[in-house]
Image (tube, rainbow, N blue to C red):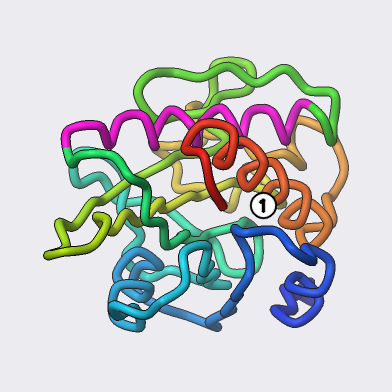
């Protein structure tokens, strides 16, 4: 039995948070960054989040493929309208990586490290990654998509052989399964709070 993310419950638990004001959970998509761009328009709310239970073509930095075993991790993208120029997108990557790291530390008392520019590691192995893509908008704040992938409940065999020595999940690090829904809420809350602190608005 896969533990499924429930959009309505996530949204209800997040209350007045800016990030997570609208949540969509897709069963499967090529990439959540692409999916959120397809549904977004000039009126889309900042803070919309699209999760996918399974990504068939998740992307990492430098065109790398991001492996996403169905129902085992958190794969999602956040629609943002930060008032920064296109050249400042590394600030968003840094914000997201620090937010993931902080949420893992708060929830599980693990000590993640950030491998610049966009990876979060535990014991030198990758547990999460960030891919920020920005789009210029005429007469409006630029659109930014923060794509985030977190390995949550994978066992070692869920990773391809070539990644087994370089990837880790929260479950492997903790020796037990994690409630994905509960961690998704904690992570979105952390990202929302730190986004407001750094970028001045929700």
Q: Could you say where residue 62 lies in the image, as x and y percent from the top left?
A: 19, 39
Judged by its main secondary structure, the magenta piece is helix
Frontmost residue, 64 versus 155: 64
- In the displayed structure, 103 sits above or below 30; it is above
Image point (29%, 77%), residue name: 42
Question: For mark 1, what is the residue?
Answer: 188
Horizontal arrangement in the rendering, residue 133 relative to residue 86 (left or right):
right
Question: Horizontal and vertical percent for residue 68?
Answer: 49, 58
Question: Extreme front residue here?
Answer: 139
Q: How busy is the neighbourhood of tag 1: few (under 14 within 10 Å), some, or many (20 plus)?
A: many
Q: Quadrant of the N terminus?
A: bottom right
Magenta part of the chain: 87-105
Total numbered labels placed on residues in the image:
1
Q: Is residue 105 left or right of residue 56?
A: right
| Residue 92 falls within the magenta-colored stretch | yes
Q: Nearer the viewer, residue 63 or 157?
A: 63
Residue at (40% x, 51% y) in the render: 146
- The residue drawn where x is 35% and y is 56% is 145
Secondary structure beneath dot 1 equals helix
Answer with left or right where residue 180 lies relative to residue 118: right
Residue 149 pos. (x, y %) = 50, 50
Quadrant location of residue 35? bottom left
Q: In the visual, does 40 lie left or right of 181?
A: left
| Residue nearer the viewer, 172 or 97 | 97
| Residue at 63% over, 22% down | 122
Instruction: Tell me residue 39's x, y (percent).
Output: 35, 83
Above or below for 67 versus 5: above
In the image, residue 62 lies in the stretch drawn in magenta:
no
């Amino acid at each position: 039995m896969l533990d499924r993310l429930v959009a309505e419950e996530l949204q209800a638990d997040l209350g007045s948070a800016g990030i997570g004001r609208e949540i969509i959970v897709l069963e499967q998509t090529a990439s959540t960054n692409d999916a959120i761009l397809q549904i977004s328009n000039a009126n889309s709310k900042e803070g919309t989040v699209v999760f996918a239970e399974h990504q068939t073509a998740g992307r990492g930095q430098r065109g790398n493929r991001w492996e996403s075993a169905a129902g085992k991790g958190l794969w999602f993208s956040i629609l943002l309208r930060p008032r920064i120029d296109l050249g400042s997108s590394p600030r968003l990557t840094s914000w997201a990586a620090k937010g993931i790291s902080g949420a893992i530390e708060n929830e599980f008392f693990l000590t993640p490290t950030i491998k610049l520019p966009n990876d979060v590691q535990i014991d030198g192995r990758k547990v999460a990654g960030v891919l920020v893509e920005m789009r210029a908008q005429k007469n409006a704040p630029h659109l930014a998509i923060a794509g985030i992938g977190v390995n949550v409940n994978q066992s070692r065999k869920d990773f391809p052989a070539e990644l087994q020595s370089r990837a880790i999940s929260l479950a492997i690090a903790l020796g037990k399964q994690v409630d994905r829904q509960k961690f998704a809420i904690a992570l979105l809350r952390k990202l929302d709070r730190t986004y407001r602190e750094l970028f001045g608005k929700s």
